[in-house]
Amino acid sequence: MKISPPFAILALVGVAVVALSYQRQMAEQEQMQVRRTQCDVALTFLQNLETFPSQPWLLLEVPEKSPTMEQIELALAQNPNLKNDPDLEIEIKKAKSAELGPIKLCKSIKKWAVENRVRVERGEPISRGSTTPDWLVTDKNDKYGWHIVQISMPVISEDGKSAYFNVSEYFGPLAGGGDALEYKKLSDGRWKFHSRVGRYIS
């Protein structure tokens, strides 16, 4: 049986469409798996936070401040040696997902917040004009009424065995600090703190 050219072309197009659809489906599944891993790491950190009975927790949802892709490209143009920096890949991933945060994207963290009566707020930890959010009001000792915690979306390494993210904690004006943390995946699939990559204190 002879197949006419139009039918052959249609068959090839059909195969290509099926292949593209399959690739897209696989990419979406892979992305969902990465998101689940990111949420697992963030939740592990929050579950291990020390409690402060005098200060209830307030989880602050703020998009992480990281370099934009334009800033990264400009830095690379000015200093090509940065291409050899092992942290470049992490910064690029952060730049591409800077608007994302685990509180907004992870159902497990929302559930954890409800179960532990953790207040969740959106906004910067600064006063806005003449209006100060009630959670930023301080007492006579200049302390917030809340133990304020902020966490970025973890960045997962290519091999899936390491995770990197930033955390900040505030207790009062000029009283707090933050860390860049590295977590490692254990053989049983759980995540565990491995090292502090950086730290700041105010």
Image (cartoon, grey):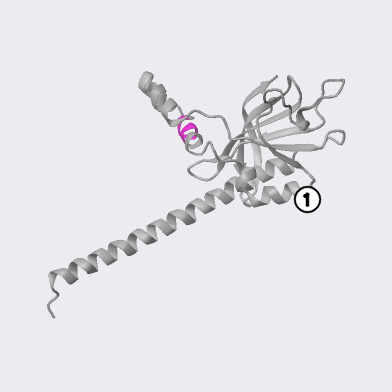
Residue extending furthest toward the front: 130
Above or below: residue 75 compared with residue 95: above
* Quadrant location, the N terminus: bottom left
Question: For the stretch drawn in magenta, what is the main secondary structure?
Answer: helix
Q: Quadrant of residue 136?
A: top right
Q: Which residue is mark 1?
A: 115
The residue stretch that appears in magenta: 88-92
Q: Position of residue 70 (x, y in %)?
A: 41, 28
Label 1 crowd bin: few (<14), some (14–19), many (20+), radius 10 Å: few
Amino acid beneath label 1: Glu
Q: How many numbered marks are there? A: 1
Question: Residue at horizontal 61%, vertical 36%?
Answer: 152
Q: Is residue 51 magenta?
A: no
Left or right of 56 on screen, residue 100: left
Q: Position of residue 94 (x, y in %)?
A: 51, 35
Q: Is residue 186 visible?
A: no
Locate residue 17: give its quadrant. Answer: bottom left
Tell whether 151 sits left or right of 18.
right
Residue 57 versus residue 160 in the image, above or below: above
Residue 153 visible at all: yes
Residue 16: x %, y % from top left: 28, 61
Q: Residue at x 66, y 42 (%)?
A: 192
Above or below 117: residue 86: above
Indicate the position of residue 160 as horizontal and vertical percent values. 52, 45
| Image quadrant containing the C terminus | top right
| Observer-nearest of 67 and 162 | 67
Q: Secondary structure at mark 1?
A: helix
Write the residue at 74% across / 31% down.
133
**Residue at figure coordinates x 52%, y 53% from the top left:** 32
**Side of 56 relative to 168 (left or right):** right
Name of the residue lying farthest toward the bottom: 1
